[in-house]
Amino acid sequence: MNDAHEVRGDVVTSYKNAPTRTVTAGGVTFAYRELGPRSGVPVVFLTHLAAVLDNWDPRVVDGIAAGHRVITFDSRGVGASTGSTPKTIEEMAKDAVTFIRALGLKQVDILSFSMGGMIAQVIAQTDPQLIRRLILAGTGPAGGEGIKNVTRISHFDTLRALITLQDPKQFLFFTRTANGRRAGKEFLARLKERTKDRDKAISLVSYLSQLKAIHRWGLARPQDLSVIQQPVLVANGDDDRMVPTQNSVDLARRLPNAELVIYPDAGHGGIFQFHEQFVPTALEFLERP
């Protein structure tokens, strides 16, 4: 912990070294990590299917934390957080709000990815005053095209990964082109940079609950997104197998105050593959007056 580049005073500047803390609220003890400066509006990260604290790309976390307080957390029943995982996106959103309020935060920016982006859309509708700005990456609206197929695609790619001794994210998050394969390997290597105090993997029960929640979201009636007035940055790769890219286009069209960034030859994990482009774009978006 004494690397001068990674801890300045008592400010943690590297996700690799961010200690895992806990806060208890609503009968749940939430595990979380925070880093970056203490002042300003914090950026809360909402994560994807099956993810724990260690699944965030450290380049994205550290990049945003260079200018903002960043908070990542395990939702109920996931990783080191207690309780049982809800089977609806709406309940997950309630838990996220409980966690944010437990830290005494009155307003946050949200950076969300995949399932996290579904949760973020609900929070923006139930607790609009809590969110200042919103980043929705690799996600889609309720009832969005192909979202109900996430279970089938996840099972298929998990099997494919087992057979080929690879991580399912290589197939789920990245294209099968030379660029996509290389980007996937680099991303998976970055996820291993933290060697101490790693999080617990998600349990099968929690994973299946999350799949059920996403499936329900995919079958749900479309929501009126015009009520989400916050500035929104929508980002994805141009070839997302998990949440088809058309959903990102649809979100940007239906949200009244949105802009869209699509990365070429990239899949679901486009913001990780293109982290060198995404981080400055996200920072510029978050830092607008």
Image: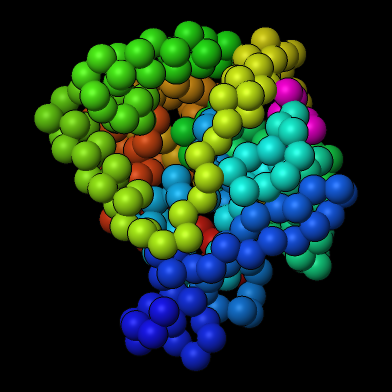
Res. 263 image quadrant: top left
The percent coordinates of residue 117 (x first, y second) are 59, 37
Q: Is residue 147 above or below residue 181?
A: above
- Which residue is situated farthest in the right direction here? 26
The answer, for residue 181, to whether it is visible in the render is yes
Q: Is residue 267 visible?
A: no
The image shows residue 107, relative to residue 30, as above or below, that is below
Q: Where does the C terminus fall, quadrant-wise?
A: bottom right
Q: Nearer the viewer, residue 98 or 30?
A: 30
Residue at x-position 30% and y-position 19%: 162
Residue 131 position, x and y percent, is: 72, 54
Magenta span main SS: helix
Q: Which residues, given as a range, are shown in magenta?
A: 87-92
Q: Does residue 128 sit above or below 108 in this rendering? A: above
Tell me what residue is drawn at x 65 percent, y 17 percent: 212
At which x and y percent is residue 148? Answer: 57, 11
User: Would you identify the image quadrant in which residue 161 lies?
Assistant: top left
**Residue pictured at 86% horizontal, 48% vertical:** 27
Location of the N terminus by quadrant is bottom left
**Which one is in front, 130 or 33?**
33
The coloring applied to the image is rainbow
Residue 139 is situated, as x and y percent measured from the top left of the image, at 53, 31
Residue 119 magenta-highlighted: no
User: What residue is at 76 percent from the left and 39 percent from the top?
Assistant: 83
Give the farthest residue toward the bottom.
9
Choose between 252 and 157: the one closer to the eye: 157
